Amino acid sequence: MSVFEQQVPGIGRLHLRRASLPEDAPILHAWVSREHARYWGMLGQSLEQVAAAYADIAQQADVYLGYRDAAPAFLVELYEPARAAVAEHYAVRAGDRGMHLLLAPAEQPVSGFSWAVMQTVLEFCFADGRTERVVVEPDIQNSKIHALNRRAGFRYQKVIQLGSKTAHLAFCTRADYQAASAGQSLAGAAAPPVDPIEHLQAEHWSVVNRELVRKAIAELAHELVLEPRRQRGGEWSEYVLAADLPEIEYRFRARLLLLDQWDIAASSLEKTERGQPAALDAARFILEFRERLGLDAGVLPVYLEEIASTLYAAAFKRAHQRLSAADLVHAPFQELEAAMTEGHPSFIANSGRVGFDAADYQAYAPEAAAPIRLVWLAAQRRCTEFTSLGSLSYQQLLHEELGASTLQAFEAELRRQGLEPSEYLFLPVHPWQWFNRLALAFAAEIAARDLVCLGYGSDEYQAQQSIRTLFNRSQPHKRYVKLALSVLNMGFMRGLSPDYMRATPAINEWIDELIRGDAFFSDHGFGILREVAGIGYRSRSYELAAPQGSPYRKMLAALWRESPLPKLAAGQRLMTMAALLHRDRDGVALLPQLILASGVGIDAWLDRYLGCYLAPLVHCFYRYDLAFMPHGENVILVLEQNLPVRVFLKDIAEEAAILDGSRALPPQVQRLAVSVPEHVKLLSIFSDVFDGILRYVAQILLEQAGYVEARFWQRVAECLLQYRDGQPALRAKLARYDLFAPSFPRSCLNRLQLANNQQMIDLSDPAKNLRFAGSLPNPVAAHFRQPSTGVSSTAE
């Protein structure tokens, strides 16, 4: 007898009945003993064992069989959390109901079936007026159920240990589920107001403030903004740093590594105020050193807000992301992406996101890993420009991204409003951008039907570390989408320019052809993820009112970028390069764990990594005057048996440059050519790679693997020397721009942000705003050797 049922269009009648034991044991055994249900913990058990297990489960939980029409199709267990082991991990509330859900293995998968089952089960749960919140604790490796849970409105709180199972603890209130079912933001107004601040606990707050103050001292000392005074000691010395404000001092133990890297022992960091111990507070630290930081009245409050947001994000990560470094070695690509702590390690305020409120954070921040559905608009063709690779038409792109049924629905909506679909182009927008900027700022265009809101797309996406780039979770082989997002983050308003969109596909096509045409890149496993299409809407009002480069001219544009997944060979997987700098909540770094899992030594692992990453970037510079922004968020590693075998570079059109303003280029590619002073050109390697990435890799390996710094930089030097010896035609240019020079200009990123946190750099003239402070000793200089005899000296 059914206890609950509903008819689902396109699926059929879904209904539940209470399980009857032992009669239903064969059905349960057929499901839970198979690989499909490995997270159920009964893999390979006999019928008798399963029957006995469910006899025990039925004493503690309500067990239901779910049917699709007449066929058994899913299993539901509902329990009281207060009487279960999960109660040890959170404060149980009245109205909590625990839930386990298992879908039977399907011979012929039915599109939308999983979501229909989830909706049916939650409708059943909330039909009981006593249920206010559903609690789940799925295995952390069960990525399919995580996606389904998040789509249904579950909020992931933390990772817990239940016996031998490492699980996510997540909650879904009645309001969360109703908002999710309606396609609204899962962190909208219906959410309990305490949810966005649950992670702001004293235990987390003190840790993240200590870490951010430690980082601020280390990076500002590296940039010579602050100069700690050495008191005593050997390799590890004691230092004191006096603030601008009187009677405030910071004391700590540190050692100075190569590249003037300050390795500060976080546990040793202490602050005194008038001789008395004081709490470490990152915002107060900024105020205490305001004069030396050069923060004017316009920059200071915004910078403090970015510091507060960075601390908020760090506390969230500490509270919610409890996967160890060892766990992350084998984690799926998107789980890794959401777990990262150091996308931009040099910046102190690196998670500003000014514009997001606390609910937006849980809905759209990369570390929240919440599902995001895009809002789609129809834009009048006369105001809109679409460009793509020569082989990709607008119609093909939209059919591949939206599918025929969604396209037909969007066209029908236009006709319903008396509009002709052929007069419009469809473009996606970030839901935050729609609700917070476009619906208001473009009100006139909306009223005139130059812009028409079509509703949500069906696919679910996940924010990447760069915030405005979204990965398709529903269909991972589909393209990334990069969207305008008017949020201030790390020195830039993260808009997207229609002007840039016009040339983006042509630039990507040109660079891709260049890379594909050079055997060096293929030999070293180097490639790009092409931005295959772009679309931008031009508001006549804002274009007349705002100067070139203004955020008001960057509010409505999008691009599509290739996914790396279709490019993988069998046995390969992906890892963001930011993972090489990641440390878990216990301070354990992922990189040494990854090298250990590869089964090769550190030397061999580094040689493979540098061959895939550094050597191609050096070749780009010397052969083509081509430079990228190759930081951790922009590089995706391809691993095979935990060894790097390839690298994909992304964010091409906005962050690539030809460092020769006089070079003749195709018209659509001409914007890449920039005039840069000679002494600045090689900073694309020295600053962006040596100082921006490799000094942190060297520090991690020294700290946690005992790998001597000199040996690390010797491996880097060997990579460069092998490149030099293999490129006799470039001998003159290699001598002109010497990678083994004794020193190079110290380019200071935090000085840039402290001077202007609205727009650090003019992308059309990237060298104009750079801030320098003396020079840095080149760590590879000591490992230079002359070319072997017999090498041709043919000049380029």
Image: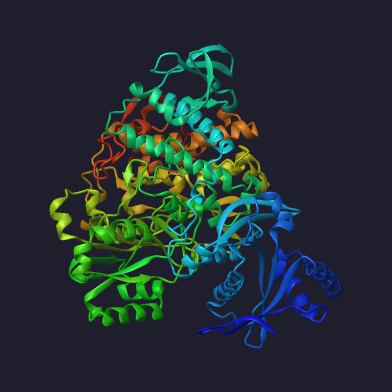
Residue 188 in view (yes/no): yes
Q: Position of residue 217 (x, y in %)?
A: 46, 26
Q: Residue furthest bottom?
A: 70
Residue at the image point whose x is 52% and y is 16% from the top:
239
541 and 753: which one is in front? 541
What's the image's color scheme?
rainbow
Q: Examine the image and state in which quarter residue 15 appears.
A: bottom right
Q: Is residue 44 above or below residue 626?
A: below
Q: Residue at x 86, y 74 (%)?
A: 48
* Place of residue 233 in the rendered image (x, y in percent of width and height, measured from the top left): 58, 13
Point 31% across, 82% down: residue? 412
Q: Indicate left or right for 437 with 183 as reference.
A: left
Q: Is residue 135 left or right of residue 343?
A: right
Residue positioned 65% across, 59% down in the render? 137
Q: Quadrant of residue 224?
A: top left
Report how many numbered discs are placed on residues in the image.
0
